[in-house]
Image (tube, rainbow, N blue to C red):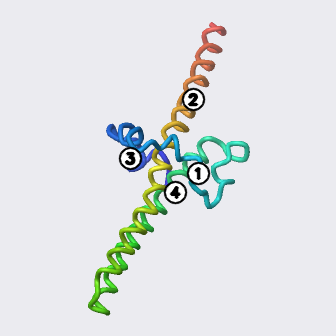
Amino acid sequence: ITYKQCFFKEKFFEKNIYTKIKVKEWKDKVLTYAPQEFDLKENSLETVANNMAKAELDHWINSLISISTISFGFISNVFWPFIVSAIFAMAFETQFIVLQRYNRPRVVKIIEREEKTKIEKKVMKQVVKI
């Protein structure tokens, strides 16, 4: 899994959603399971971006699993507790998905800027040689 895959690229409508739900105000209050995986002192930008993609995928999978709990309603013939718990579980997972999707484009911009700088330096070295 890599942040460069299409699924993990920022969509055109996302920034507006993040502004409306004020992600910037609450993003620092969200718990992180393994903060060392997102630490820029310990990991490269590419590694952090890839870890963000993996974390997002994990939370998508958790959301799907929470939907599957509705099937337990067939055993008990009572669906509402499973539907309610699935909705709450999905809502809980959504905060982590939003957080990864909000932060990753910023990390990717820095990666792209660094790559562009490297290319420019390489070109300048070649120009100086000529």
Q: Which residue is mark 1?
A: 29
Q: Is residue 110 left or right of residue 62?
A: right
Q: Amino acid at mark 1?
A: Lys
Could you tell whether 93 is left or right of 82 in the image? right
**C-alpha span from label 3 to label 1:** 28 Å
Chain-order first, disc 4 or disc 1: 1
Q: Residue furthest right?
A: 41
Judged from the image, the secondary structure of the residue bearing numbered disc 4 is helix
Residue at (26% x, 91% y) in the render: 77
Residue 117, position as x, y percentages in the image? 59, 22
Residue 76, position as x, y percentages in the image: 31, 92
Q: Which residue is mark 2?
A: 115
Q: Amino acid at mark 4?
A: Lys
Q: Residue 51: x and y, percent?
A: 57, 53
Quadrant for residue 64, please give it: bottom left
Label 2 and label 4: CA atoms lie apart by 22 Å
Please state which of the two labelled residues, at mark 3 or mark 4, is closer to the viewer.
4
Query: Up-down: is 57 above or below 112?
Result: below
Q: Residue at x 50, y 49 (%)?
A: 100
In three-dimensional space, the C-alpha distance between marks 3 and 4, rounded to whole angstroms, equals: 13 Å
- Residue assigned mark 3: 6
